[in-house]
Amino acid sequence: DVKVTQSSRYLVKRTGEKVFLECVQDMDHENMFWYRQDPGLGLRLIYFSYDVKMKEKGDIPEGYSVSREKKERFSLILESASTNQTSMYLCASNWGLNTEAFFGQGTRLTVV
Amino acid sequence: DQQVKQNSPSLSVQEGRISILNCDYTNSMFDYFLWYKKYPAEGPTFLISISSIKDKNEDGRFTVFLNKSAKHLSLHIVPSQPGDSAVYFCAASGRTSYDKVIFGPGTSLSVIP
């Protein structure tokens, strides 16, 4: 059974903190993605990675960075958390172009 | 500017009737389209997909139709069941840079028993 696991379901952090969201997939997928989901805006792509140590900006990369040191792990980093980064964060992975993506269960991040 | 649009934020349908969810896209480079279903507090799960070389794909109660000239696709659920109540996201990918998958804003479907 394929699995994408996000390290936390719920997180509460203070403004200005550095925040790490971790994602691990066990399917040997090439691509990994980070999205955030906000009401009325759907899923917006923050960053994605098509190989180890490779990354590409998505549509809303400002205030975020990522790390992919191993194929199975993709981390999202909020350098200095702000209240407008309060959101549901979703990690996903897939084999490559035109294949379905598998999602983690999501991390609900609240920045106070 | 949204490249994938779902203009109906919500839809209510009686159990047993047909649900039709619509999606429009603007980028003619998209050549693969997917529908995902999402329950609250869970990640989206893949439902059905269609390649641009087809105009219809069917999987059980779910059928996706693609009209390339209109840049429009739709998801039909027949018959609708209460368990189908969820948010449905349309997504597109293709010959854009790398393997980006672009999602629409979602349509919340309520199936009334």
Image (cartoon, rainbow, N blue to C red):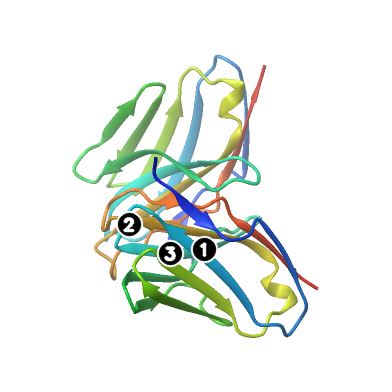
Name the mark nearer the viewer: 2 or 1.
1
Number of numbered callouts drawn: 3
In this view, the residue in front, B57 or B72, is: B57
> Disc 2 sits on a residue from what chain?
B
In the rendered image, which residue does mark 2 sit on?
Answer: B93
In the shown orientation, is residue A88 left or right of residue B24? right
Residue kind at label 3, given as amino acid type:
Phe
In this view, the residue in front, B110 or B42, is: B42
In the shown orientation, is residue A91 left or right of residue B112? left
In the rendered image, which residue does mark 3 sit on?
Answer: A33
Task: Determine contact: label 1, label 3, CB under 8 Å.
Answer: yes
Query: What crowding class fits label 3: few (fewer than 14 Cα within 10 Å), some (14-19), or many (20 or more)?
Result: many
* Residue positioned most to the right: A112
Rendered location of residue A74, percent (x, y): 44, 69
In the rendered image, which residue does mark 1 sit on?
Answer: A35
Q: In the rendered structure, find residue B29 and report the number of the disc placed on it.
A: none
Rendered location of residue B67, percent (x, y): 30, 41
Whether labels 1 and 3 share one chain: yes
Rendered location of residue B102, percent (x, y): 42, 59
Query: What crowding class fits label 2: few (fewer than 14 Cα within 10 Å), some (14-19), or many (20 or more)?
Result: many
Query: What crowding class fits label 1: few (fewer than 14 Cα within 10 Å), some (14-19), or many (20 or more)?
Result: many
Q: CA distance from mark 2 to mark 3?
A: 13 Å
Q: Secondary structure at mark 2?
A: strand
Q: Write the residue at 29% across / 62% down.
A: A30
Residue kind at label 1, given as amino acid type:
Tyr
Rendered location of residue A25, percent (x, y): 41, 57
> Disc 3 sits on a residue from what chain?
A
* Residue positioned most to the left: B53
Q: Secondary structure at mark 3?
A: strand
